[in-house]
Image: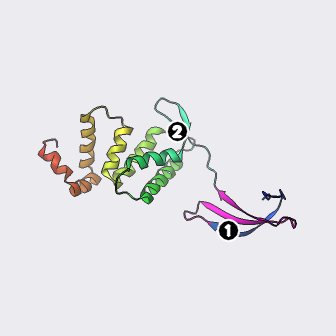
Amino acid sequence: MRCPFCQHESSRVLESRTSEDLTIVRRRRECFNEACMRRFTTYEKVEMSPLMVVKKDRKREEFSRDKLYTGIRKACEKRPIPMSTIDQLTDQVEREIRLEFEREVPSDAIGEKIMNGLRDIDGVAYVRFASVYRQFRDIETFAKEILTFLNSEQGRGQATESNGAEFWRREGKE
């Protein structure tokens, strides 16, 4: 590794540490040049091949983990969901799409994976994301999605807590 100060071609590793998730290695180094001997830090991370997202209009854009995280975070806004859970879901969705798709991934596949994860975490976050992702045009479509959720395994557990299913039964919607 070249020294960033004197440009000498060699340095030695003094210490190495891995990140908590074992994806990055941090190395403290020292320049071999006796006139310099300065210390610096390098980071080693696996470089993934670029993954392209194929949008509904067939346009392509490079996959963005930040965009994935932002979408999940917005759906979970003002909900009692720890940031660590949002981070874990972001990691899970990225890992799943990188395992399943090599070079191109349809945007639909990403949206479905996010919805599946949110369905298990929080019903309100799930419906929020679904309303944007599926582009609900009217209240009937929105209500159908809520009923589908309430009738699902995850929804029944969450509806019991908030009595949401009881509301729909009283209204004669179920």
On the rendered structure, is 75 left or right of 16?
left
- Residue in the image at 57% along x and 41% along y: 103
Would you say 146 lies left or right of 5 here? Answer: left
Question: What type is the residue that disc 2 sits on?
Answer: Val
Q: Which residue is depicted at the point 39% across and 51% down?
A: 117
Quarter occupied by residue 24: bottom right
* Color scheme of the displayed model: rainbow
Q: Secondary structure at mark 2?
A: strand
Mark 1 Cα shell of 10 Å, populated few (<14), some (14-19), many (≥20): few
- 153 and 38: which is toward the camera: 38
Residue in the picture at 12% in, 46% down:
170
Q: Quadrant of the C terminus?
A: top left
Name the N-terminal-most of marks 2 and 1: 1
Residue 168 lies, in percent from the top left, at: 17, 45
- Looking at the picture, tell me which residue is in the foreground, 112 or 62: 62
Q: Is residue 26 magenta?
A: yes
Which residues, given as a range, are shown in magenta?
A: 18-45
Residue sitting farthest toward the top: 57
| Label placed on residue 53 | 2
Q: Residue 74's spot in the image, x, y percent?
A: 41, 47
Percent across and percent down for residue 17 are 64, 68
Residue marked by disc 1 = 16
* Identity of the residue furthest to the bottom in this view: 14
Judging from the image, what secondary structure is the residue with disc 1 in?
strand
Residue at (52% x, 47% y) in the render: 66
- 105 on left or right of 37: left
The residue closer to the viewer here, 111 or 131, is: 131
The amino acid pointed to by label 1 is Ser
